[in-house]
Image (cartoon, rainbow, N blue to C red):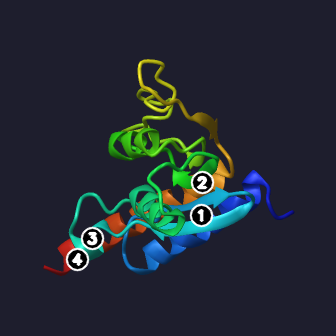
Amino acid sequence: MQENTDEWFMKQAIEEAKKAEELAEVPIGAVIVKDGEIIAKAHNLRETTQRSITHAEILAIDDACKRLGTWRLEDTTLYVTLEPCPMCAGAIVLSRVQKVVFGAMDPKAGCAGTLMNLLDEPRFNHQTEIVSGVLGEECGALLSDFFRKLRQKKKEKKMQQ
């Protein structure tokens, strides 16, 4: 796989998602790219921090803003393994991310085209280009496997009681 392709950068987001899984977090990872270079990486930390806002996208956006010294992330691309939720979609629009590339669709909370599309809403002062389904099967399998194992653990725990 050639560097600097959507697939290559999504692989980097998948590596971040695997870090989340190692912490018993929902395996979602994100990277932000500017001028062909990764400037920020993050993974979900909600369970670790017990803070609802510590989604991979929010953490990556915050890190990118600190590194660039600006809240405007124009000319950047955000790669994330799962379609952004409403909170993350709002942060993407407000930080002016130029493009979002995501892997798996999110039928319960997806706001980049599944339930609604907040990223390309013309009534906002900024619209974001969207590319969906990049390594979608791999990203989806990571999540499905995680939740299957979690259900199995709960079932086993219940049977031991």
Tell us which disc is closer to us: 2 or 3: 2
Callout 1 crowding tier (Cα within 10 Å): few <14, some 14–19, many ≥20: many
**Marks 3/4: CA distance?**
19 Å
Q: What element carries label 1?
A: helix
Nearest the viewer among 150 and 15 is: 15
Instruction: Find residue 65 and name its label.
Output: none
Res. 59 in view = yes
Q: Provide the residue designation for mark 2.
A: 79
Quarter assignment of residue 13 = bottom right
Q: Provide the residue designation for mark 1.
A: 13
Q: Provide the residue designation for mark 3.
A: 47
Callout 3 crowding tier (Cα within 10 Å): few <14, some 14–19, many ≥20: some
Q: Who comes first in sequence, dot 1 or dot 2?
A: 1
Residue at coordinates 45% horizontally, 56% vertically from top-left? Answer: 57
**Marks 2/3: CA distance?**
22 Å
Q: Who comes first in sequence, dot 3 or dot 4?
A: 3
Q: Who comes first in sequence, dot 2 or dot 3?
A: 3
Q: Who comes first in sequence, dot 4 or dot 1?
A: 1
Q: Quadrant of the C terminus?
A: bottom left
Q: Provide the residue designation for mark 4.
A: 157
